[in-house]
Image (cartoon, rainbow, N blue to C red):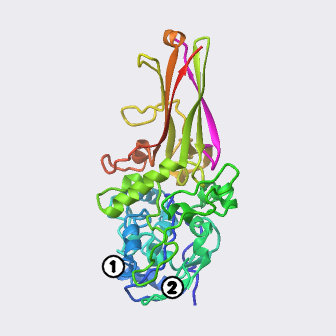
Amino acid sequence: MHTTNRNLRPDLPHWMGLWGVLVLTACGQSDSKQTPSSTNNAARQSRRSPPEARATKHFSSKGCEGCHPQQYAQWQHSMHAKAHTEPVYDFYFMTASRDDKKLETFCGRCHTPIGTTTGQIPFKHALHKRGDTRVSSVAAEGLNCDFCHTITGHTKVQNAGFIFAPSLTKRGPLANARPVSHKAKHDPYYRTAEYCGTCHQVVHPTNGIHLETTYAEWKASPYAKAGVVCQDCHMTRSLVTLRADGAIPAGKPTRHPGKASNMGGPRKHVSDHFFVGPNLMFIQGTAPDVVAQRKRSEALLRQAAKVEVGEVTRKDGVVEVVVRVTNKGAGHSIPTGVTEIRQVWLEVKVTDPKGRVLLHSGARDKTDRIRPGAVVYRTHVYDAKGRDTTLFWRTVKKGRDRRIPPLKTLTETYKVPASTATRRAKKLVVEVALQYRSVPPWGLAEAGVPKGTVKVPIFTMCTARKETLLR
């Protein structure tokens, strides 16, 4: 009998904006089903056994590679595979743990569900340094094949409200699968946004403040009305672009023929398992799959938005520049996910014919902080002392939330102060770039990430340039 593990609270979230759906997988270890009582036994056993001995009820993704080499090769470089082990999350996780030990399960429920299921989380010790969060090799796989393909539904679409029922029956979106190493079940649920939304909609566990709203953003968007779901963009090789009226120009999302298993026949569409997203700082290396993943991540960012320079006028020596930024390709707001951390901003430079810079908004200082006065798209949250923080679990108040909704255009106006140059110039050049980074340097410092641990790249999503004659 499939059961929901009642020891795993359904109100426990995923903090880092990750997407998930896997095709059917094969297995390489024995399996036993989880029940509330067996999970309690596992938790008691965890006090006596080393981590490796506590992962026997779940399968490693390595056992799936033999039949599904393409899916495994893509997944192993994904943010799903790194959900519990990547260093930025690790330091945020340890900082949260020192605030409240209960947050270990709160975060771990989506970042290492097998770690929470087997009683490895919460940890029995205090967390201070990397390595203190070590779990078994299976649990360290984050959102692995066995977890994703034994989800049977949800209790609610937020805070890890999925129903996780480990068994030898692996579920997925493909029909007529006949694997040799396990049973298979075709499940239409795997083609829904709700499947992803259980970890991509996060509500604060004590005060109810909405912290991550990716699913809600999609649900209210034209994409939901057009039937375009998360998997159509994040598990294919291009975004689904809608017209302003919400129609899909090509009629349906792109499809990629192939084989879901090296022992199966051809399929009209086989999903990619990179789970492409914007976290470029962890897509490093020269392996072919890594290079392919990075290219797709960069393409996703480039396809998501556009900027344009509008009217440029002058009055009494003051030059006014209008810039428009449009979310043309994302089925959620830009940015999304943990938008208390993410930064998307406009960098605008105005120069005269001699190359003199009259305005440079969105520039960064020597510490890599964005200088004051820039247009930054993110969510501001405040802790009990009224400080703007990236430690979102400390949120007691939500402040300004300025982001770009799907298919919407925001208009920003810049004023160049009057000067001799602005009064005399007959022509000006306006250059605009929409910049993105996953986490700002002050956020890394706030979480206690040592300098040099990670290098956060700044990626230019789109640009525009205009030369204009002034009257």
Q: Residue at x 47, y 65 (%)?
A: 104
The magenta stretch spans residue 407: yes
Q: Is residue 162 at least partly visible in the picture?
A: no
Q: Is residue 65 above or below residue 421?
A: below
Q: Mark 1 belongs to which amino acid?
A: Glu
Number of residues whose C-alpha sits closer than 10 Å to that of mark 2, classed few (under 14), some (14–19) or many (20 or more): some
Q: Residue at x 51, y 49 (%)?
A: 303
Spatial distance from mark 1 to mark 2, Cα to Cα? 32 Å
Q: Position of residue 400 (x, y in %)?
A: 62, 41
Residue identified by numbered label 2: 177
- Residue at the far front: name it: 250
* Magenta-colored span: 400-419
Residue identified by numbered label 1: 52
Q: Residue at x 40, y 59 (%)?
A: 293
Q: Mark 2 belongs to which amino acid?
A: Ala
Q: Earlier in the sequence, mark 1 or mark 2?
A: 1
